[in-house]
Image: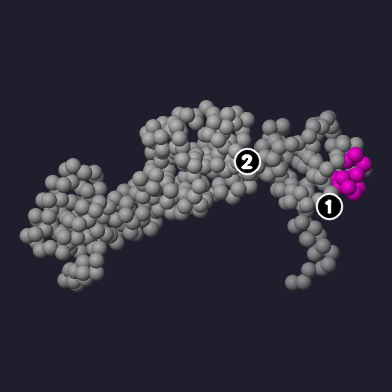
Amino acid sequence: MLLSLPFLAVFIAGISASNVVDLDSKTFDGIIGKGKPGLVEFFAPWCGHCKNLAPVWEQLADAYSHAKDKVVIAKVDADGDGKDVGKKYGVTGFPTLKWFDADGNHEPYDSGRDLDSLTAFITRKTGIRSNIKPPPPPETTILDVHNFNTVVLDTSKNVLVSFTAPWCGHCKNMKPTYEKVASTFKPESDCIVANIDGDDKKNKDLAQKYGVSNFPTIKFFSKDNKEEPINYEGGRSEADFVAFLNEKCGTQRAVGGGLTDQAGRLPNFDTLAKKFFMAGAEARGKILKEATALAADTGAASKHYVRVMEKVLNGSEAYVRKEATRLAKILEKRNLAPTKLDEIKIKANILGAFVKDSEGEEKIARAESEL
């Protein structure tokens, strides 16, 4: 169906409607200082910084669209129709942001020009919350002067600390990757990924103590040497951070979360597993005894090698393939707690030690064909 031109015009106007109140020298005093507080941007159409701020300003007005009767988000072309009101309030550069209370008393806004900073300011001034859903809690451990020593100088923990600043572009670019890395290492209680606002006044002495002169600065505090942290000078990709922490913490975390295919594997037990799988029944019994004795003095992973051997001896060689398939399906769904997924991944990795080479694969295939 064709739309009439008047209807189309109304439709276009509707979808492009802005929640920003557009003021000029004639309308300003009729809105500002008339019982509602407001944040006002004095801009110039030719100003590059104003153009960069424009979409944020629209988002800010949208964020308080539910409270138009309580707070005003406005803009004034102070180089055009609003030049007189701009002069009245001492505007000499663009953009200039000013906060006006309900009676028209004003003060400069000199905090960050990102959406989070702007909404935080308005909420602090009015008690009105924006309709923006709060971000999820950070995956990183957040530090400040009050908990820094408790976390970072704990000799039972390795800690990677990023010193950042809210206004730092490189910090903002790094943050999503750094959060992913923090999430990946969450199950490692002794390998902590942390962040501190090194530009916050209360934390500046800490930043100075550790020689932080630019942002982001990243330092690794090992369990063994808290006095001389290592400057992280590697790349800032997820893989770079994960590789660094695996090396320093002795972990086996995989990019994207979970464990690597080598997690839980023990070289001496891998050798026994290969011998076991290729051996005859009598020899397998001897290898099982050897593995059982060796496992008595090693960790939990070694005991899983023993359990696999027992399952095969008491059941079928097809157990390894079937169990590996079952565990792979569980890992693919990833709907269990991270610690449980780690446990299953280690079991799946150990099963892999029993089918390491093509000869072993062929033996499994033959066993399955006999079922």
Whether residue 62 is visible: no
**Looking at the picture, how far across and down is residue 143, in whole percent?**
52, 34
Q: Which residue is mark 1?
A: 45
**Looking at the picture, how far across and down is residue 171, in whole percent?**
59, 45
Q: Is residue 88 rendered to the left or right of residue 245? A: right
The quadrant in which the N terminus is found is: bottom right
Q: Is residue 257 rendered to the left or right of residue 35? A: left
Neighbour class for label 1 at 10 Å: few (<14), some, many (≥20)?
Answer: few
* Residue that protrudes farthest toward the top in the picture: 146
**Looking at the picture, how far across and down is residue 56, in whole percent?**
71, 48
**Looking at the picture, how far across and down is residue 231, in whole percent?**
49, 42
Q: Which residue is mark 2?
A: 166
Closer to the chain start, of discs 2 and 1, is 1
Part of the protein shown in magenta: 75-87
Q: SS for tag 1?
A: loop
> Which colouring convention does the figure follow?
one colour
Q: Amino acid at mark 1?
A: Pro
Neighbour class for label 2 at 10 Å: few (<14), some, many (≥20)?
Answer: some
Q: Residue at x 18, y 42 (%)?
A: 297
Q: Is residue 176 above or below residue 190?
A: below
Circles 2 and 1: CB distance less than 8 Å?
no
Q: Amino acid at mark 2?
A: Pro
Q: Is residue 313 rendered to the left or right of residue 196? A: left
Q: Is residue 148 above or below residue 173?
A: above
Place residue 61 in its image quadrant: top right
Q: Residue at x 53, y 34 (%)?
A: 210
Place residue 262 in its image quadrant: bottom left
Q: Residue at x 43, y 48 (%)?
A: 244
**Near-viewer residue (264 or 60):** 264
The quadrant in which the C terminus is found is: bottom left
**Near-viewer residue (278 or 61):** 278
Q: SS for tag 2?
A: loop
